[in-house]
Image: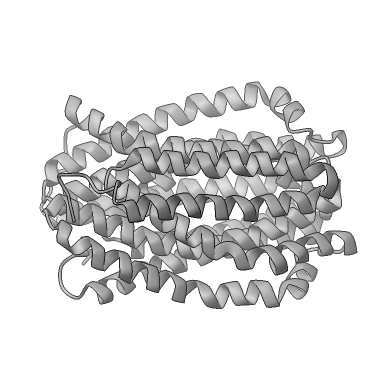
Amino acid sequence: MIKLKKLYEGNVTKNFFVFAFPLVLTALFSQAYNIVNTIMVGYLMGDDAISAIGSTAPFISLISSLFWGYSTGFSVYVAVLFGRNDYPRMLNVIKINLLAVSLIAVLVSSLCIFFHENIFDYLNIEEAIRNEAFSYFSIYMAGLIFLSMTWSCMYISNAVGLTVIPLIASVMTNIINISGNYILIKYAGLGTKGAAVSTVFSAFCVSILYIFTLMRAFKNKGIKLKGIYIEKQDVKRSLAFGFPTMLQQMVMYLCTAMVSPLTNLCGASAISGYTIGMQLYDLNAGVYQNSNKTLSNYIAQCVGAGKASLIKKGIKTGLVQTVLFLIPFLSLTVFGSNIIAGVFLDSPDSIRYAHVFMRYCMPFVFFNVINNMFHAVFRSMGAAQFLVISTVIYSASRLGYSYLLYGKYEMYGIYAAIVLSWITEAIFGFIIYFSGKWKSREYEL
């Protein structure tokens, strides 16, 4: 039977591990797909195809961040209501938000496709790869409604302790994507269109899995599924949790999109190397970000249950667990950088760009582990102002460092800017955390 799970009940350390392990596996499966997909695209179509997809990736991530950012936020409110045992309101909040997210996804995707030429001009996408870039971009955006539904349901599942479901969904996504890519690229000759179609179709299938699984879990709990009503308080609270996280994610990815014109001027070899380097970063980030989701949901459930005294223990447990999860993957990335880069890329220049990022920049990712932990704490405690300010500091510093260092060091300057921005944000996070200003009066520790 599928059971909803409260993290503050029983052995906290065991609960953290049991909750986080499927999340980390989910991240690994997700990133493994991205990596395998990149290998397939490079092998079947060449480095230019990787550049075509990679050149639009920052903007796609910016748009996607609106939806997974909001979903991350409103799911915290779901976790609060779950911890409070207010199941009817929790379900209504879920319905309202899923409906709103779907409608907005349709609007945003339509606008992106209509104005794609303006977007591509801003991103400085080369004419040689523009057609392939549009093939991927347009299909991805057309399927944004299914992708947004998948992200929302994933965070809802995490909020109510169903972390095994995202793991199953991730495996399902990988199987559909990889097999779809192989068939559509190699045999149907669809190129980057095939990669995009596989992504959208897998999101469609997985969204159906999520919806039926969540419905079954709620029925097992005795929660009535029928009906939806627009409650002003629920809408207000959803926005209070969801909008700051959406803004935080948007600011971060807007910064990446604003740096993209610089990276796209560095040439195809640099873009390919940068794309692979960032995919290995995403693999490691997926580990610590998904591990920290345990902390985020734990704190939210504690707040809802009125058990704020347990939060400090959760923060310590979460940090230790996250570091232990990360070390093996980070070590492999750093010390195997040349071998890994050679698996993806053919050009020596592309391999060099990927190697430099993995070997010399990735060791500093521990600063971003701390940043992500602070994000989890601020978000779950309702200290949205610090969450947003922290991300603005990261984004502004990365943008400033990038434009300052690009002129002399080009792509290597952009790499250095990423590291310096991690450190800058971490300094701010430590100051706010140890000042205690993030603690609300209602939930004073």
Report the side of 47 relative to 116 (left or right).
Answer: right
Q: Nearer the viewer, residue 269 or 359?
A: 359
Of the 4 image quadrants, the one containing the N terminus is bottom left
**Quadrant of residue 5 in the image?**
bottom left
- Residue at 16% across, 56% down: 308
Residue 270 place in picture, x, y as percent: 82, 52
Report the side of 19 relative to 112 (left or right).
Answer: left
- Residue at 71% across, 54% down: 416
Res 168 seen here: no
Report the side of 166 relative to 86 (left or right).
Answer: right
Of the 4 image quadrants, the one containing the C terminus is bottom left
Residue 284 place in picture, x, y as percent: 56, 65
Report the side of 269 relative to 394 (left or right).
Answer: right
Q: Which colour scheme is used?
A: one colour
- Residue at 35% across, 54% down: 433
Q: Nearer the viewer, residue 285 or 346?
A: 285
Residue 356 place in picture, x, y as percent: 76, 64
